[in-house]
Image: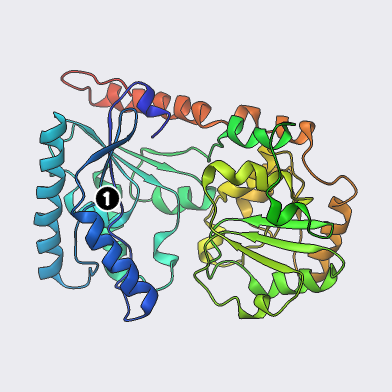
Amino acid sequence: MRALACDNRVLWVNSIGYRTPTVSRRDMSRAFKKLAAAFEPVREVERNIFVLNPLAIPAYGQASIREFNRGLLRWQVKRAMRRLGFSRPVNFIFNPPAALIAGALGEDKLIYYCVDEHLAFTGVAADSLARMEERLCRMADLVIVTAERLYESKARFNAHTRLIRHGVDFQHFRRALEQSTEIPEEIAGLPRPVIGFHGLIADWVDVELLAHIAGNFSEGSLALVGKTTTDVSRLERLPNVHLLGRKPYADLPAYCKGFDVALNPFRINELTLNSNPLKVREYLAAGLPVVSTPVPEVIRLKHCRIADGPDEFAREIRQALDDPGPSLARSELMRAESWEAKVDELRSHFAESLARHPFLDRGAL
């Protein structure tokens, strides 16, 4: 959206969530934050990018609740569109619950941009979500997927399904190679090697594998940057594991500069088999050697060490440490993988869609 905002105005509608919340402290806190955010006015967070925080009931199993959400969401989005002077927009949808109002906003084009196998997330109402996603796929003028397995599952519903793999904010992560970029103090003095990870530490991250790695590199440090939403008590007990918490996106290249090797320690399951981990391209753009579990899209990228099992993972890390830290040659592998290049691919597929069903007045995109 940031790349598209160079030539278009974007109304970004924040997610209404995938799953029904529990009574846990974390879920209740998140619910109150969403409720507070819903009363904030639409704001321009960057040039041409406006953000709406919608209010909806995060439950999709009951028809009455779906109908209530449909009316409420449509009213909120249409009101924001009126304030911004939007008419006949291109509607990009990134998650199945947004199917509730797909086609109800006066849009000229509907694009479903699928980046995950949403039905495989923990705690979702899979049956309801599956029906919404199938409807969305069938309605869309264009379906974009980011992984081969996603293509196989979504193309069944729409012949106009196209594969565009993720890009990377190349120039941003390239800063890890700049002399002026300072390694943050909290990792600058850690015992070497520093084996790093950044991203959400959720139930798809193999905590047992990370504990095994920490034990195999007791002379070094395991630095984990990111918000934690799963049980990491086993890691907290290890003296050379450093759970550093969530950091601003702007600071990630500096943390990458402090890593000797970077990890993608995903469990192999239906969710991750359909994933295309952004962090891997970010690590490579920062010039880092990468070790990953056998996620198909990481294997297809060809620039990472792939390890199946804890002992093999440790061996691959040791081999990666023969050439540690940011490398210009590794960074250059990602130069052609920028988001701008991916938007060019998107524009090409969008032009095909226009040829099938032209706009009355063609937009930019």
Rendered image quadrant of residue 169:
top right
Q: Specify the farthest residue to the right.
A: 322
Q: Nearer the viewer, residue 116 or 201?
A: 201
Please tell me whether residue 193 is drawn above or below residue 24 in the rendered image: above
Please tell me whether residue 300 is drawn above or below residue 237 in the rendered image: above
Rendered image quadrant of residue 210:
bottom right
Report if residue 300 is visible in the image: no
Identify which residue is drawn at 66% across, 37% down.
285
Which residue type carries mark 1? Leu
Residue 243: image x %, image y %? 63, 66
How many residues crowd mark 1 within 10 Å: few (<14), some (14–19), many (20+)? many
Identify which residue is drawn at 75% across, 65% down.
308
Report if residue 323 is visible in the image: yes
Residue 179: image x %, image y %? 75, 31
Q: Specify the farthest residue to the front.
A: 185
Q: Quadrant of the C terminus?
A: top left
User: As drawn, is 297 to the left or to the right of 106?
Assistant: right
Identify which residue is drawn at 71% across, 45% down.
183
Report the coloring of the rendering: rainbow
Residue receiving disc 1: 136
Identify which residue is drawn at 66% across, 33% down.
174
Q: Quadrant of the N terminus?
A: top left
Residue 336: image x %, image y %? 62, 27
> What is the total number of numbered labels drawn onto the structure image?
1
Task: Please tell me whether mark 1 sits on a helix, a strand or a loop.
Answer: helix
